[in-house]
Amino acid sequence: MTRRVVLIALPVAVMLAAPGSAAAHAGPTAPVATSFVARVTTKPVGIAVRVLYGDQELALRVAPSRTVEVLGLLGEPYLRFGPAGVDVNQASPTSYLNRAQPVRVPASALTGGPPQWRHVSDAHSFRWHEDRLHALAATGRSPHAGYIGPWTVPLRVAGRTERIEGGLWYVRAPTKLWLWPIVVALACLAALLRVRSTRLDSALLVALGGAGLAAIVAGHVEANLFVRPGLAASQVGWLAFASLFTVATGVLLLHPRWRALAGLAIAPYALVAGLTLLPTVRKGHVVIRLPATVDRFTAVTALTAGLGTLLVVLVHSVPLPRGERSERPS
């Protein structure tokens, strides 16, 4: 009974403790892959513009000596770049609607009164979730769609109305063949486990556990270090956690007595890493700054290793039928 409780409780505990990239970067403003790409075609001179996460965020950099206002959905002042940094207008309905998760616009922002500026940054660059980039996304889900249509974000520069203009494109999903290695590998593993050899089970556990640890570290590096423009302290912390976890469980994995316990810890963490990167296999545009093939290979490896390790541990923990020769070390 105690062993059964450990088999159930340990994977759940590791799944909750291991943040992976899914927990650290959940939400539509930080995807690892998308089906749509927004590109800038026209911008005012002297203003640097970038689209982040495919079609989710817009980033502006303005010279400290200039004052530039980003106009909202109703043409009202929304953001203001100036010598002191960046301010947001709390009386702008766009500041509530133009979010990854829109909130209800308060009555005070619906009266059309004067701007109520709130300072949000001392820097002269700022990025925000911008719905206008992907407003046409719902019309472009045909598997053969390419260019969908234009988008515009108006600005006020030195009293003149100017525009950032661009287009939205749909990117087809990659081939479904990326998922077949998981199916084939697990089918082969199931056949090997029917041999019921403790020595073979141990070798499989070491191989799959090692692949899972490699995928965990790779997944953290890809999603934590390459998705966002900068590197936050929390990302460094989670990467350090993954490194310590890899060393500790790697040592246990090499010890016959603790091998199954290490596998129970590795399996759910590898599954977290694989599920975090799974959108790279399902969607056409990969946001991570590495070749898409590398990210998709990591996702497939993590899922295969996680499922395979868990399967080997569960089979390995079941006693051999009476009369069969056990090769379990004493």
Image (cartoon, helix red, strand yellow):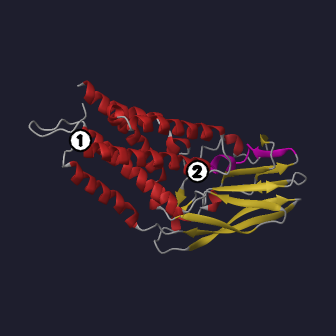
**Residue at 63% across, 65% down:** 38
Amino acid type at mark 2: Ala
Q: Position of residue 141 (x, y in %)?
A: 48, 67
Q: Position of residue 304 (x, y in %)?
A: 37, 52
Number of callouts: 2
What is the secondary structure assignment of the residue under circle 1?
A: helix
Neighbourhood count class around disc 2 (C-alpha, 10 Å): few under 14, some 14–19, many 20 upward: many
Residue indicated by mark 2:
30
Q: Which mark is residue 29?
A: none
Q: Which mark is residue 198?
A: 1
Residue situated in front as seen by the camera: 128 or 48 = 48
What is the secondary structure assignment of the residue under circle 2?
A: loop
Residue 62 versus residue 177 in the image, above or below: above
**Residue at 26% across, 28% down:** 3
Which residues fall within the magenta stretch?
A: 84-101
**Residue at 45% across, 54% down:** 299
